[in-house]
Image: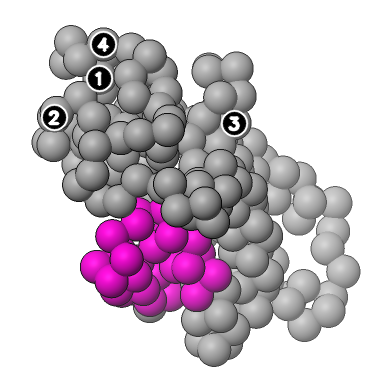
Amino acid sequence: MNAWLDGAPLSAADWRLAALALAVGYLFGSVPFGVLLTRLTGAGDLRRIGSGNIGATNVLRTGRKGLAAATLLGDALKGTAAVLAAAPFGLLPALAAAAGAFLGHLYPVWLKGRGGKGVATFLGCLLGLEPLAALVFALVWLGVAFASRYSSLAALVASVASPAALFLLGAPATAWLFLLLALLLWWRHRDNIRRLAAGTENRIGEKRRHGGK
């Protein structure tokens, strides 16, 4: 199954397996942990709270730090689980599952395509494929967040550092995938980028303003 890395053509069976992994990964990724957890704990409809985003940052605006941590963990591990479920069948299905999980979080079928921004799921997929690159992501995120106090900026920089780390680790196929996922992540953060440029983006620990992340 991994012979394609050396230029061997993929068979019809290979393509079917990759397509199946993509679909299963999408179903994993489309589970909206933030929405489910806030509803189950009586915190309300997350899409009507704060920015309306379904990620952990917005869950934190409910005042429930434990709930936000659980959302972060769930959104990350669904990406890891999708990758690990497909990995025994080869690298291509694992990459397809990672792509599916990321797309599922961004555009979940259950929420009519209105998903999150993908940071935790990006990290979770990375963890399943290349743990060292996931460590690079985490360290870069922490460094930028500590220095700037901008969560969004930290995510943007870390997402770019990840493909670079993957190339250095000798995983070019994975690096190209995560370069594409990073571009999608930047697109989903386009409003944050505008606010960063304007100096109106919310800092970590700062009261939300101007419809922040």
**Spatial CA span between label 2 and label 3:** 25 Å
Magenta residue check for 9: no
Residue drawn 73% across and 77% down?
A: 5
Q: Residues within 10 Å of mark 4 (few under 14, many from 20)?
A: some
Could you say which disc has been placed on residue 64 in the image?
2
Q: Amino acid at mark 2?
A: Arg
Bounds of the magenta span? 133-161
Q: Nearer the viewer, residue 56 or 148?
A: 148
Secondary structure found at label 3: loop
Percent of width and height locating residue 99: 61, 50
Residue under pointer 3: 107
Tell me which label, 3 or 1, sits earlier in the chain. 1
**Spatial CA span between label 1 and label 2:** 9 Å
Rendered view: 47 above or below 207: above
Could you say which disc has been placed on residue 44 in the image?
4
Q: Nearer the viewer, residue 179 or 77?
A: 179
Rendered view: 162 above or below 206: below
Q: Are marks 4 and 1 in contact (CB under 8 Å)?
A: yes
